[in-house]
Image: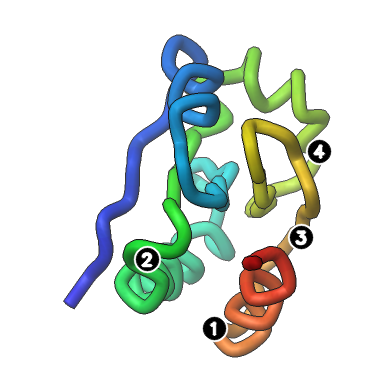
Amino acid sequence: MSGDIRTLADDNFAAELQKAELPVIVDFWASWCGPCQMLAPVLEELAADYSGRVLVGKLNVDENRRTAEEFRVLSIPTLIMFRNGREVARISGFRPKEELARFIDQHLE
């Protein structure tokens, strides 16, 4: 079963982070990026595994350059973990599910 993944954009990014009561992990990606495509099903599994504990969002950097620039995303995929609307950690490049789960676990209460 796939989890709920929110589509984020320049016009809703800040509001979505501010209203989130859970930690949010955002995948900064692009459609032409091979590693981004490989990461997509892994994120769906993680969204299901962490349902109710973490929100998962995706932001297409080609369509939403302002937010990607604001967070200085220089390579993709980049995953940024936010708590209370603030960045707490980031990881770049394709990573296996187990490594990403450890990354998320480090930032849960």
Q: Which residue is mark 1?
A: 97
Give the mark toward the camera: 2 or 1. Answer: 2
Real-space Cα distance between discs 3 and 1?
13 Å
Q: Residue at x 56, y 51 (%)?
A: 23
Earlier in the chain: of badge 3 and badge 2, it is 2
Q: Say what amino acid the circle numbered 4 marks.
A: Leu
Q: Which residue is mark 4?
A: 74
Real-space Cα distance between discs 2 and 4?
24 Å
Give the mark toward the camera: 4 or 3. Answer: 3
Give the mark toward the camera: 1 or 4. Answer: 1
Residue 15, image x and y in percent? 47, 18
Residue, far front: 109
| Side of 55 relative to 82 (left or right) | left
Real-space Cα distance between discs 3 and 2?
17 Å
Q: Which residue is mark 3?
A: 91
Real-space Cα distance between discs 1 and 4?
22 Å
Q: Secondary structure at mark 4?
A: loop
| Side of 63 relative to 102 (left or right) | left
Q: Say what amino acid the circle numbered 1 marks.
A: Lys
| Side of 88 relative to 68 (left or right) | right
Q: Quadrant of residue 35?
A: bottom right
| Side of 48 relative to 89 (left or right) | left
Real-space Cα distance between discs 4 and 3?
12 Å
Q: Is residue 27 above or below residue 36?
A: above
Q: Are marks 2 and 1 in contact (CB under 8 Å)?
A: no
Earlier in the chain: of badge 3 and badge 1, it is 3
- The label on residue 47 is 2
